């Protein structure tokens, strides 16, 4: 009888110590949903209690001082991007060609 009680206690403890991981993983989306609902309710309450947005005077557009000419748009960013692309492409092609020459796959005739 005492052995039967001890076996029952060990069976209950085994359920707590070695859980069914597939059931726990399957429960995670429900747990995330349960935990996110109070956060969403809290955010909604804060949004409802928030005062209306204050709209002050609009920002004054800045003017270029007299005597200073502002240049038009430049192609420099496009040229820089194209140059960087071509530089990196050349480095990649050169590295590939060198590795092929070392392995004997490519014969160079001069």
Image (cartoon, rainbow, N blue to C red):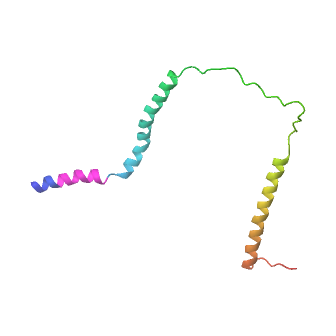
Q: Furthest-left residue in view?
A: 1
Q: Report the label total.
A: 0
Q: Which residues are magenta?
A: 7-18
Q: Position of residue 58 (x, y in %)?
A: 71, 22
Locate the C terminus by quadrant.
bottom right
Residue name at image x 24 percent, y 52 percent: 13
Q: Position of residue 100 (x, y in %)?
A: 74, 74
Residue name at image x 86 percent, y 43 percent: 74
In depth, the one of 69 and 41 nearer the eye is 69
In depth, the one of 1 and 42 nearer the eye is 42
Q: Position of residue 23 (x, y in %)?
A: 37, 48
Residue name at image x 83 percent, y 78 percent: 108
From this view, report whether residue 99 is shown above or below residue 4: below
Instruction: Judge from the rendering whether residue 19 lies leftward or rightward of residue 67; answer left or right.
Output: left
For residue 93, what is the image quadrant?
bottom right
Instruction: Judge from the rendering whether residue 67 lies leftward or rightward of residue 18; answer left or right.
Output: right
Question: What kind of secondary structure does the magenta stretch mostly adopt?
Answer: helix
For residue 39, what is the image quadrant?
top left
Residue name at image x 81 percent, y 52 percent: 80
């Amino acid at each position: 009888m005492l052995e039967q009680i001890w076996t029952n206690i060990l069976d209950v403890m085994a359920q707590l110590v070695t859980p069914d991981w597939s059931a726990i993983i399957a429960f995670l989306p429900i747990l995330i949903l349960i935990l996110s609902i109070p956060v969403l309710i809290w955010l909604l309450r804060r949004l409802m209690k928030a005062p209306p947005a204050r709209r002050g005077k609009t920002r004054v557009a800045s003017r270029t001082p007299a005597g200073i000419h502002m240049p038009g748009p430049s192609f420099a960013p496009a040229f820089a991007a194209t140059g960087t692309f071509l530089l990196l492409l050349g480095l990649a092609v050169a590295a590939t060609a060198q590795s092929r020459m070392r392995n004997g796959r490519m014969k160079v005739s001069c």
